[in-house]
Structure formats: C-alpha cells, structure tokens
Amino acid sequence: MERYDVVVVGVGGMGSAALYHLARRGKRVLGIERFDLLHEQGSSHGLTRIIRLAYFEHPNYVPLLHRAYELWRELQAEAGERLLHVTGIVEGGERILDGVLRSCADHGLEHEVLTGAEVARRFPAYALPVDMDVAFQPDGGFVTPERCIVAHIEGALAHGATLRARERVLEWTETGNGVRMRTDRGEIEAERLVVSAGAWSQDVARLPDGMVRGVRQSLAWLQPTSPALFQPDRMPVFNLALGGEHFYGFPAHGIPGFKLGRYDHFGSGGDPDSIDREPTIEDEAPLRAFAERYFPEGAGPTVALKTCLFEPSPDEHFLIDRHPDATAVVVAAGFAGHGVKFCSVVGEILADLTLEGQTRHDIGLFRLDRF
C-alpha cells in the first residue's frame, strides 16, 4: 500500500497552496484531485479574483491578508510570473462601507472616502449615484486563480510532491498510525490528511450537518464599447451593494471583456453534483442590467457567461481547524467564494496545523466549535 506523510484531498486554490507549503517543509506529500487540474466545477477559476485589504466582513481577516500579500509576492517572484495585480478597489453600499471603514480604523489602512461623482471623475468607467459614498482602498486588486494554482503546484512538484488528478476519494478512516483512504483507484495510507474539497467538503470531510453547502453563482464578461476605460491601469476592481443586491467586478484581463459577478446568497444550492452548471439568459439579465446602469460603457456584447459554486458556512466565515472527530485530519472549507485571495496564507496555516497542531496565525474566527 502507498504511504505518504500527508495527503491533500482537493487541489484547487487552498489544496494547491497546502501541497506547496507541506512539500517545502520536506514532507512526502500527495495531492488528489477528483476533477482535472484547473477545472471549473468549484470556485478556484474565473481568470481574476478580487483581493482587498480593508475587509468589510470582519477586521480579524486583515492580518491574514497582510501575510497573504507577502506570500503572493514571494510566489510570483519564485514563479517568474505576475500573479498579484494592484488596481485599487472601490467598495460601498449598505453594510459594506461601514465594515471597510471599521477595518481601516482598526488596522490603520490607507483609504479615501469618495462620492460617486468623484469616482467618475477619477475612473470614468464608473457611473455610480453621484452622492453615494464609497471607500477607495489603493491596495485592492486581483489575483489570477488558475495561474496561482499552477504556481503552487509547480513549486510543490519541485520540492518532491506528487499530484494525481481524476481520482476520487471514496472514504477515509483514522487508524492507530494515521489515516487510511480508499479511492476509485486503490488504497493509500498517510500520517496526516488535509481535506480542502470545496463545495464537496460536507461529505468528503464528514462535517457535522449543515456546515457547508454548494450555492450556484453566475458571472459574465461583457465587451466594453470604450475598452480603454476598462484596462487595469484605469479601472479599479469593485465590491458594491446597490438596490438590495451585491455585485463585484474587474477590469479586462486575460480576455477582452469587463468581468462582473452577482453574489446570490439565496441561489440554488445543496448537493454540488446535482446543481445545474449551464449558464442561461436568466443568469445574464441582472448582470447586464447592473452594467448598463453603473458601467454603461462596459455593457457591450457578451463575451463569456459562466457559473461557479460558492461554499458558504452558516455564518459565511471560513472553516479552518483540526477535525473534531479525527486528530490526524485537518479541514479547510466554507470559503464562500471570497477565499481565493487567502490561498497563499491558508496553505501556510494548513501546513502548520497538520505538522504542529497549531499556528501562529489567529484563526479563532474560523474554528469549527463556534457552532
């Protein structure tokens, strides 16, 4: 039977980072991915994903983000490829602005409060309500998720890791000297197991009922009628709550289209294998309506329309902890679509928890026993 120091199940954003940090520490580590590498079944795809330092969800995320920025810069230097793009970020509306300002105040983050009219003068792609207050935070931007996964994987392989795709873990059992797994290709033993299975974590990680669910989301790329306004050097990313809905978006990068998504908290969800992944005109309609109203020169023909799965926990904060019923198992789940920016530091945390049972990072907000 094959035996490893650590097996990582799920090699998307979080799993690839865990594989990298474990391999760098000299461990014999195997990554198992159910789908293809760089698949679009979960949420570690989409060409661009927002990174933002002033975190409206909770100020406790900010120290992790400082470390994430450091690690992204280290990784891109090692990979010889730009992975982190700083454009600035515009955030506002409903609970978002208050949360951003709280994080800025608690952590002394550079920011400005601007009106919609001021945003339009500075960044002409925007056409927000003229008297709307928003925060502009210069450290915001985006990471390129597929390239980040490749960089972590290539770094892990260079340090001796093994990667296998198209292999599904069917069950695992804690034994007297580690964990035994049965996959659809055979059996494997390891001293430790890391489960980072995204929307499938509820079953794969054997979490208590209701800890994670898959929720279908939609996103679109629209061809701008004024492409120069939507380049990364002229358009910050945005995260906005308007009209009772939550939208986010990006300048054109990697594809000739202005990308935007709608955070649908109540979208169709449940078993990730039964959720329809095919995007529809109904998915496109609210995205186009938002673009036509607030980014009118970005609302040209549709370039691409896709779906992805978010995996929220009940309170939409992360789940990062040792397994409550298996001392040799560490779980990373519940990233709810806003986790990709943290992959670099979450990989470090997972390596800490796996090898040392603890981490220097404050992850009290993410412990499983909070429920």
Image (cartoon, helix red, strand yellow):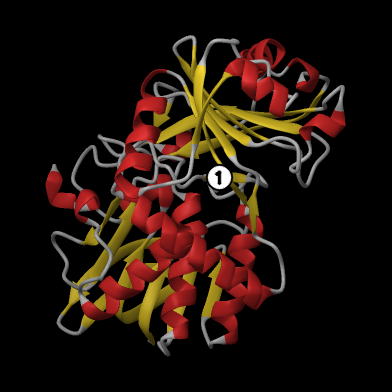
Other-residue count near label 1 (Cα within 10 Å), few / some / many at <14 / 14–19 / ≥20: many
In the image, residue 164 sits, relative to residue 310, either above or below, namely below
Looking at the rendered structure, the secondary structure element under dot 1 is loop
Front residue of this view, candidates 92 and 326: 92
Mark 1: which amino acid? Answer: Gly
Residue shown at 66% from the left, 20% from the top: 280
Where residue 271 appears, as percent x and y from the top left, is 39, 36
Horizontal and vertical percent position of residue 134: 50, 24
The residue singled out by tag 1 in the image is: 140
Quadrant, the N terminus: bottom left
One can see residue 92 in this view: yes
- Residue 223 is left or right of residue 338, and the answer is right
Seen in the image, is 100 located left or right of residue 367? Answer: right
User: Picture coordinates of residue 34 (x, y %)?
Assistant: 51, 59
The image quadrant of residue 211 is top left
Residue drawn at the location 83% of the way across and 21% of the way down: 301
Where does the C terminus fall, quadrant-wise? top left
Residue 28 to residue 32: above or below = below
Name the residue nearer the viewer: 349 or 82. Answer: 82
